Image: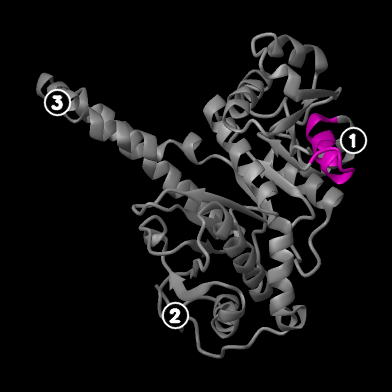
Amino acid sequence: MNFPRIAIDAMGGDEGVQVMVAGAALAADRYPQVRFLLVGDQSRIERTLDRHSALRPLVEILHADDVISGEEKPSQALRRARTTSMGMAIHAVKNGSAGAALSAGNTGALMAISKLALRTIPGIDRPALAAIMPTLQPSDVVMLDLGANTECDARNLVQFAIMGAAYARIVNSQPEPRVRLLNIGTEDNKGTEELRDAAALLKERAGDLSMVFDGFTEADKICRGEVDVVVTDGFSGNIALKAIEGTARFVGDLLRRSFSSSLRSKIGFLISRPATDLLKHHLDPNNHNGAVFLGLNGVVVKSHGSANALGVANAVGVTQRLLEENLTERIKADLARLGTETLRAPHKVTAEAGQG
């Protein structure tokens, strides 16, 4: 039997090999069908594996001499890709020795190396970084792009919608995801020309793509659970993501400060502990770890650099499910139904952009 194998950049992230190997060990308990290619300093990986003996039979080690730092520019990382743990993990996908790559390292470098090595799916101009975020409803929301492309035209946004819907059908088991474009208002005449052109095309062709296009959404509605896929350019998406993450940390810090301000507050904390623990679990990024570069000829997943072993294990879970559900082939099938000629000539909307 062929088991899916995931190449892990064991040297990436804030804690490096310790957390990445511990996360792989935790994932091996959850997903016994997965095998691992650990890429990095062999001696350090071997020493860490001594503390995870059950993982060793499921692992092959690929030695890499170099590591890409968090501050390294993508152009510099590209020149050293073939000798680094990140680059070698991605090339393992390219040459077929792994089905997917997972790294917690430098996001810009990971995107640049992945795009050069794997190329994009025919019909996709640019890969997009997609992640899932918690909502008030039982299912999460998929959001893209989160920083890979700072400027996007209507064609890019339509492609992102196609890829995001395919991803949502896998991770949230939604046969027809509700898709909206992030905008400054929900009225049809609001936003940039690119947004309005993309909306016009998606309204026209959503029925061909197993999605429900619901028009525009605003940033304060992202986590309400009213939409399954939020599509935007990487500039706006990254700002929105950082604002949501910052607000979550602010709420957590405010609660901690409030509950420690007096004896009465401390007693109140003990009474409300189950509720605050549930809130902490819901807002913990480790429980939603694993952003995906959609649109590549291969699966590449980005883990939070600060993720703990649980976060890495969750990212492995996302990776193995994308392999299991053939994400790349699903995106290709959706593109074929839409037709690449349609994407080359988005319907033009002439209304003036709204303000505010």
Q: Main secondary structure of the magenta part?
A: helix
User: Looking at the picture, how far across and down is residue 115, in whole percent?
Assistant: 80, 52
* Residue 324 lies in the magenta-colored region: no
Q: What residue do we see at 43% from left, 64% from top?
A: 227
Which one is closest to the eye, mark 2 or mark 1? 1
Q: Which residue is mark 1?
A: 82
* Residue 85 lies in the magenta-colored region: yes
77 or 339, which is in the foreground?
339
205 or 156, which is in the foreground?
205
User: Looking at the picture, how far across and down is residue 118, in whole percent?
Assistant: 83, 51
- Mark 1: which amino acid? Arg
User: Looking at the picture, how far across and down is residue 226, in whole percent?
Assistant: 38, 64
Dot 1 lies on which element? helix
Q: Which residue is mark 3?
A: 265
Q: What residue do we see at 61% from left, 62% from top?
A: 166
Mark linked to residue 249: none
Q: Is residue 165 above or below residue 187?
A: above
- Mark 2: which amino acid? Gly
Q: Is residue 246 above or below residue 121?
A: above
Residue 308 seen by the camera:
no
Q: Which residue is mark 2?
A: 354
Query: Does the residue at mark 3 contact the one at mark 1 (Cβ under 8 Å)?
Result: no
The N terminus: image quadrant: top right
Dot 3 lies on which element? helix
First in sequence: mark 2 or mark 1?
1
User: Looking at the picture, how far across and down is residue 124, in whole percent?
Assistant: 75, 66
- Mark 3: which amino acid? Ser
Query: What range is drawn magenta here?
Result: 84-98
Q: How is the image coloured?
A: one colour
